Image (tube, rainbow, N blue to C red):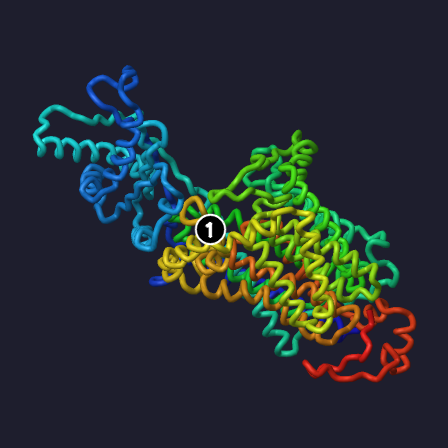
Amino acid sequence: MVQRVSQLSEDKRRLVGVVVIAAFVGLISAGLTTGMIGLIPPRIKSTELQVATASTHVLIDAGPTSIVHRRDYPVYALTMRAEMLGRVMTSPPVVERIARRSRVPADRIAASARSTANVPLALSEPGSEQRANEIFRSGVPYRLEVEARATTPVLSVYAQAPSTPEAERVANAAIAGLRDYLRDLADRQGFGDYRPVRLRQLGTARGGVVNGGAPWAIAVLTFAVAFTLSGAALLFLIRRRGHGIPVRRPRPPPEAGDDWPRTTRLLPWMFALFIAILWLVPFNEIELRASLPIDLKLDRLVLPFVAVTWAVALAAEGRGVPRGRLTWIHAAVAAFVLCAVLSVVLDARYLNETLELEGSLKKLPLLVSYVSLFVIAGSALRRTEIRAFLNYTLVLAMICALGIIFEYRFELNVFYDWSEKLLSGIFSVTAPETGAVDSIGRREVMGPAGAPLEAVAMLSMALPIALVGVIQADRWRGRILYGLAACLLLAATLATFRKSALLAPISVVLTVTYFRRQELLKLAPLALVLLIFVHVLAPGAIGSTTQQFDPERLGVTTVSDRTADYDAVRPDVWTHLALGRGWGSYEHFSYRILDSELLHRTIEMGVLGLLAYLFMGLSVVLSARATIASRDPTGAPLALIGAAAAVSFLVVSTLFDVLSFPHATYIFLYMAGLVAAVIGHHGDVDETAAMRPHGLRERRARGGSPTGRRPTADPATGTPHFARRVG
């Protein structure tokens, strides 16, 4: 007894020591990141992270009498002239005059003009040379941005500086400097006192500090990351030396016969409710009507209740607590999260100077939401419940597909329509325009998703459930039902009018074919029946989708737009090669629309982040491969479904920025969590036995084969299997 008390006290001392050391490392890291601590020489200094902005406006006028009092002058001509003068204001000769008036060196002012002209979007996106120049000048402390209004002859001038007075001085000097340049130009061209263009400033510049909380946000984030990493490293070293610190007592095995949906446990039901929201509710366009610092979308209101239920169950003692062990999938997700957080921490000062830090910090909680659903799915659900949850997912996906087909045929999105009717009092619902088309004339059919491509990703990840169900069904009734489900999902996918609607399902079929060649080939004649059903459900969808692969016929430029992005993002990639410029910092409205998640990850998280992202998808396939090859009648089909869904997710990642759309990301991560639950639960032998028929368990107990036949070897893989498949 005395020895146990002594060992417990020693473990507590080690744990306290780990916390103290980790806290010290976190404080030092936070001080270095914010600039409050200097190393050479060691000292404490004030931070230099403050950023102030100021703005003013100028009316472009003509003649001594203001245009406000004249009705015969064409306003559109002055509007076009304002666009031109905005670019003149950011030219080197004018910047030199601005520098003299504001008493700032000209090489420390980065000036740019934002275009508002009515031109194609591709022409307004920065190219490689323009983006390289922007990055080169992003480190200067003074910035000037000019934007012309689209319908009125007014220039908006925005200035950035380390302090508010300096920002106001630069903004006012911008208008005065442009006046000086135009006056000198008129004198050189012999206009004398006549001024064809007059600049009427609409009030002096006013500004203020815009990042008052940035130093504390950077410090807290850096401290949390450094504390976690150093603490984990110390605990790992202690365990390696044989001084383990016990965390929890072993969990008792789960009760038999208490599986979802025949259970009174609250956690699986909460998880099922959230899955239903993912498939049937446009939650990302539903926001609470409240003025808060963060956007309270519907998923961020519901998911915390699921997480709290999981935490309470985890803290409780008994047979219903979350259980499971770490797998390579957990390691891959953890590596991705680590790269995302480090990309923000290490580039926090750069993001603060470009005023993009706030956007990155707001998107980190969304990443936590994604990962929390994976953790809950991988630990809260029993292995014996995974099949029921996958069938439940298939039912929800079929309802989603029916709604998309209804939208395709009648141009009414029932998901948005019912959400607006039921939630309009408390929430604001941003519904899409009925019958809307994209820039190349394709209809916007999206169901509960935020875009048609997201609907494609959702349905393609549910397709493996139907295909594997057709293969595994031992009766024709089951094969017909699963086959009809596959037809429904394919018809809804093609109804989105996107080329990805063919590519993503093909990747699913190829994955299933790779692991189950013989079984799927036997069902090949049913493919013709499937095409007929798809045509009946969504008439014309197959032809409209396949024709888009001929760009000369329809003028589809999505492929050329994607290839143009590769050269345009080179400056961002090379500037932050290892860990990128920061998670969530590359916004569409500021830079380019990138139709590839792989490019997004490379820019925002660097090469390491891209590898972590790819490993997150590949880990599902590699971890499930052994279970699939075992041909276990219970675990192998579930693992195959998860592997095919992961391959589909990786394929759509090359076709659009999938992480920007939460429906698809949530679905992939909870299906990855289900695979982790299949291959990573403790007590797999007992739970697997509970999933098998009674006679099968008896034959296993006697040491015989589950079918009564001798095991043979698979000629393709060499893996032992049984001559007769067990359905």
The three-letter code of the residue at mark 1 reads: Arg
Question: Considering depth in this image, is 5 or 162 the residue closer to the camera?
Answer: 162
Residue 158 position (above or below residue 591): above
**In the visual, does 203 lie left or right of 536?**
left
- The residue positioned 32% from the left and 29% from the top of the image is 154
**In the visual, does 677 lie left or right of 153?**
right
Q: Which quarter of the figure is the C terminus placed in?
A: bottom right
- Residue 410: % across, % down: 65, 37
Question: Considering depth in this image, is 316 or 115 the residue closer to the camera?
Answer: 115
Residue 18, visible in the rendered structure: no
Residue 60, visible in the rendered structure: yes
Q: Which residue is labeled 1 in the image?
A: 553
Q: Which quarter of the figure is the N terminus placed in?
A: bottom right
The mark total stands at 1
- Residue 557: % across, % down: 44, 51
Residue 435 position (above or below residue 522): above
- Residue 667: % across, % down: 65, 54
- The residue positioned 47% from the left and 43% from the top of the image is 439
Quadrant in the picture for residue 8: bottom right
Counting other residues with Cα less than 10 Å from the Cα at mark 1, is it few (<14), some (14-19), or many (20 or more)? few
Secondary-structure class at tag 1? helix
- Residue 505: % across, % down: 62, 59
Residue 247 position (above or below residue 415): below
Quadrant in the picture for residue 626: bottom right
